[in-house]
Image (cartoon, rainbow, N blue to C red):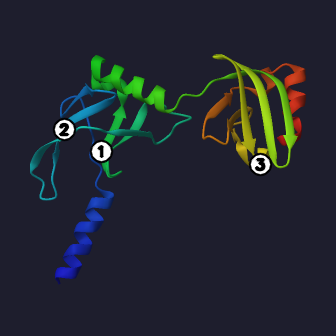
Amino acid sequence: MAEKQTEKTALKEVIAVRYITKDNARLEKNGDFIRLTVTLPDDEGNSEEKTYDRIFLHRAFPFDYPYAYISVLDADSKEIGIIQDVDAMGEENARLLREELDRKYYTPVIRQILSVKDKFGYSYWKVKTDEGELDFTCRDTFSSLLKVGGTRIFVNDIDGNRYEIPDLEALDHKSFKKIELFL
């Protein structure tokens, strides 16, 4: 019987969604990190206030809803709760959350492809972005390109950085020809 109760409790933890709102949470800068103080129900349903000196934010739908459905994790990667909408967290909290999400999901937009050279399974890119001219390297170019929707592409380099081409059709003809083979 005790084993069944443990399984039931474990299942409740997996399916329980805890929402973090402006009414039950307080965010503040903690050095380079964000500290969260939140009041949420514990396993027995009693309200419990906890402070997390460092939290990690993850977008559940990074391409479609970049500032909604944000998973908030503690230092052990255990989910604390979900923020349904960053803007509903109040002006100061929303600013902190947006800054952290923009830092984590920093993605320069590729405006022009100057060159792509393929050599021994790596491709060496030279591009113009909204942040200026950049050079990066991709391993296995075909799998480094992620198509999102019809003409939107994300490029992942060997260091884990992401670059975005919002619309392949908006690229100039020479840029498109340089990556056409990999699409």
Q: Residue at x 62, y 34 (%)?
A: 162
Quote the CA–CA distance across marks 2 and 1. 10 Å
Q: Of callouts 2 and 1, which one flags the residue occurring earlier in the amino acid sequence?
A: 2
Q: Residue at x 23, y 35 (%)?
A: 36
Q: Quadrant of residue 73?
A: top left
Residue 62 tag number: none
* 1 horizontally vs 166: left or right: left
Label 3: which residue? 140
Label 2: which residue? 38
Label 1: which residue? 81
Q: Amino acid at mark 2?
A: Val
Q: Of callouts 1 and 3, which one flags the residue occurring earlier in the amino acid sequence?
A: 1
Q: Nearer the viewer, residue 37 or 88?
A: 37
Q: Nearer the viewer, mark 2 or mark 3?
A: 3
**Residue 58 vertical position relative to residue 92 in the rendered view, above or below:** below
> Secondary structure beneath disc 1?
strand
**Residue 9, percent from left and from top:** 22, 67
Q: Amino acid at mark 1?
A: Gly
Q: Of callouts 2 and 3, which one flags the residue occurring earlier in the amino acid sequence?
A: 2
**Residue 130, percent from left and from top:** 65, 16
**Residue 174 vertical position relative to residue 83 in the rendered view, above or below:** above
